[in-house]
Amino acid sequence: MEVQEQWGIHHYMELFDQSEEINYLLDRHGHFLYVNKRAENISGFKADSIIGKSFTQLITEQALPQTVDYFQKAVQGLPQHFETQLRHRQGHEVDISVSVIPAIRDEQVAFIIGITKDISERVYSSKRLKISEARNQAILDAALDCIVIVDDEGKILEFNSAGEKIFGYRKDEVLGTYMKDMLLPPYLREPYVKAMDAYKQTGAHDILGKRMEVNFIRSSGEEFPVELAVTVVMVEEKPIFTAYIRDLTDKKLAETRIRETQAQYHSVVDTIKEVIFQTDEQGRWLFLNPAWEEITGYTIEESLGQICLQYVHPDDREMNLKLFEPMLTGLKTECRHEIRYVTKKGGFRWVEIYAALNVDEHGAIKGTSGTLMDITERKKMEASLILAKEEAETSSRAKSEFLSSMSHELRTPMNAILGFAQLLELSDLSASQQQDIAEIMKAGNHLLDLINDVLDLSKIEAGKVSLSMEPVEVKELVMDCIALIQSTAAKRNVELVLSPEKCRDIYVYADYTRLKQTLLNILSNAVKYNVDGGKVYLRCGTTEQGRFRFWIEDTGQGMAEDQLKQIFEPFYRIHPNSNVEGTGVGLSIAKRMMQFMEGDIGVSSQLHSGSTFWIELNYARSPLLEPRPDPYRLTLTYQEPNHALQPTLLPYTVLYIEDNKANMLLVQRIFEAYAHVRLICAPEALIGIELAEIEQPDLILMDIHLPGMSGLQAMRVLQSQPSTQHIPVIAVSANTMSKSIKQAEAYGFKDYITKPIDVPQLLEAITRILHTDQTCPAADSETSRL
């Protein structure tokens, strides 16, 4: 009390207790000397609990530094007014305004008088206003359309970012200016002023609340189309107009392009020769272009809305529905087929129809779109071509059959002529008679060669050539040909320069007889058309493509370029009047045979410089490879302890039906290594069937391509007879087509082995079938033999 009396504080306390404001006294160090009751409402603390505390304990941490600064200035004798934040007892912040006035006694600050007001509501309202203004400005700036706000005099109050982009003005350039002068073209300024005046007088105008298209002007002076909408609000009894302006430049350009595109589309659609159509889900025409009228004679107007099927030829309607069914049931999304459409005149036109499904976003079928192409003329041409082809084939078959028949008819008397001539050669004839007989034999053999060539050519043209494709040893082939051509070469004084040893251990995939015929023909020509004392060279090697090739080079007269183009044509001879015997069909046959064997043949030559013929074939693996020590051999030789053969049991019997001796020899060689497998062979199907009935083999290997009865036909016979239907059969064929393999499977063959025979594959198939086949009674009782 002594201090209070000394400084007169009690006077302020009495005064502050009656005040409606928050009042307090602070010492020079910031401690509360007095606080009135009003402070309890703003701080949440009791007045008595505040006295003695530092004001810093009530100020928020964020506002404290600035508040302390203000207090220090007051201590220095300078009154201060500021806003800060109080920390309420419950933890939240309270915005306050503070006035601190120094109380001076004896020229020094004795204490600080404080007056505080709660300004939370004002601060909150101010923040909300700022947020609202910022949000409105953000909305204006984020708007894609230009927003212009003008007052009742037409002055621009607001201009957003989109307006800057659209018109080319900065915001500060247009604020406060008249809208009509800055944004409107000259011819719209007067109507704009009249509209503003009319609204001021009547309070209404027909453009308010509506969208309209007008032209505005950019800062560059360019006039451009916009979509305009105007709204109005009253502020202090005066209208404030807001114009929403959307630039239509791109839209107008797009519309122009669309119109141009549509014009082009209609130009194309209206002139195209194909019918372009669209149907609904019920199959009714929705769209047809003018080509429809040209093809069918029906007008577009009378056809739209009609069922499409009624325009299909009556005989084709069922087929048309079947062809469309997979698409309409969802199995396909499009279809294409050929069908007949009726015309208005009662005829019909062939059309190729292409249709694709139209579906909505949910996948529901909404109809079809597609085209109809008139193919009537093509169909007529195809029919005429088919007829011409059939006539040509009939003529070719008749010719081939005639040649074949005549060749066989000529062969019979020729056999008699040559046979009797050979008998006469053995008789006691004079030298003159022997010379006559030799001429008969020479002419007869030449005629027989001609008959054989003509027969071969007729078979080729009739498509009746049969080949037995297999690995062919090149050295053996060359030696056979040398043996046959040597005498002819010696008679004509032509040297054969051959190196058969270079062909050792080389195999090619071919028909041995046909390849020998081809090579012999070329060697024979190289000798016959050579010069006296000439040479014939035979070489073999590999091409860059990895195929085997023969080169046959001679030192004869050679050929001109025009002759090379015809050399492989039937009946063509380079020197038709020469005394060299020949038919002119040998090279033609050779060309066809090489094609059948997936090979090739060719020639290079220069006139007076000899010729070089070449033959090209695919390499093949040797069929006589020694059996390797693998699971196949171990199984068939029963060398494993678990599979040892009991001496009291009979061996397996395997029947091999094959007409090719080389293949038969190969299989015999394979089974020579297996003492407990007995192999029997048959050269044709009928003999094989008879042996199967007698021998009751455990397994049959059967060639598919057999003379007379084929392997497939023989399989049917075996399965039809109770005594043989249980015997498992493996097909052996040079045909590797999947269709042929599936056909053999359908006939009941247990496996399908292709030529050239893969030995391990063959042994595996035999072992597997002998072990596992349960359809054979013999197998049930003798499985223990393995």
Image (spheres, rainbow, N blue to C red):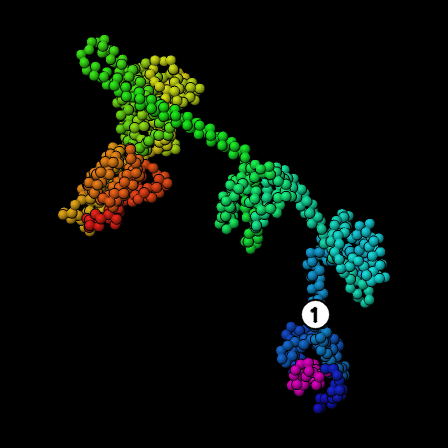
Q: Residue at x 51, y 41 (%)?
A: 315
| 231 over 680 or under it: above or below | below
- Quarter where residue 455 is shown: top left
| Mark 1: amino acid | Lys
Mark 1 lies on residue:
127
Asked if residue 36 lies in the magenta stretch, the reply is: yes
Looking at the image, can residue 428 be seen? yes
Q: Residue at x 32, y 14 (%)?
A: 532
Residue 57 lies, in percent from the top left, at 64, 79
Q: Provide the residue span drawn in magenta.
A: 23-51
Asked if residue 668 lies in the magenta stretch, the reply is: no
Looking at the image, can residue 453 be seen? no
| 104 over 617 or under it: above or below | below
| 10 over 167 or under it: above or below | below
Residue furthest left as drawn: 648
Q: Is residue 438 left or right of residue 214?
A: left
Residue 65 lies, in percent from the top left, at 66, 73
Q: Secondary structure at mark 1?
A: helix
- Quarter where residue 565 is shown: top left
Q: Residue at x 74, y 56 (%)?
A: 211
Residue 743 lies, in percent from the top left, at 34, 41
Quarter occupied by the N terminus? bottom right
Residue 514 lies, in percent from the top left, at 32, 28
Q: Is residue 50 left or right of residue 754?
A: right
Q: Is residue 599 left or right of residue 727?
A: right
| 400 over 652 or under it: above or below | above
- Quarter where residue 650 is shown: top left
Q: Residue at x 32, y 28 (%)?
A: 515
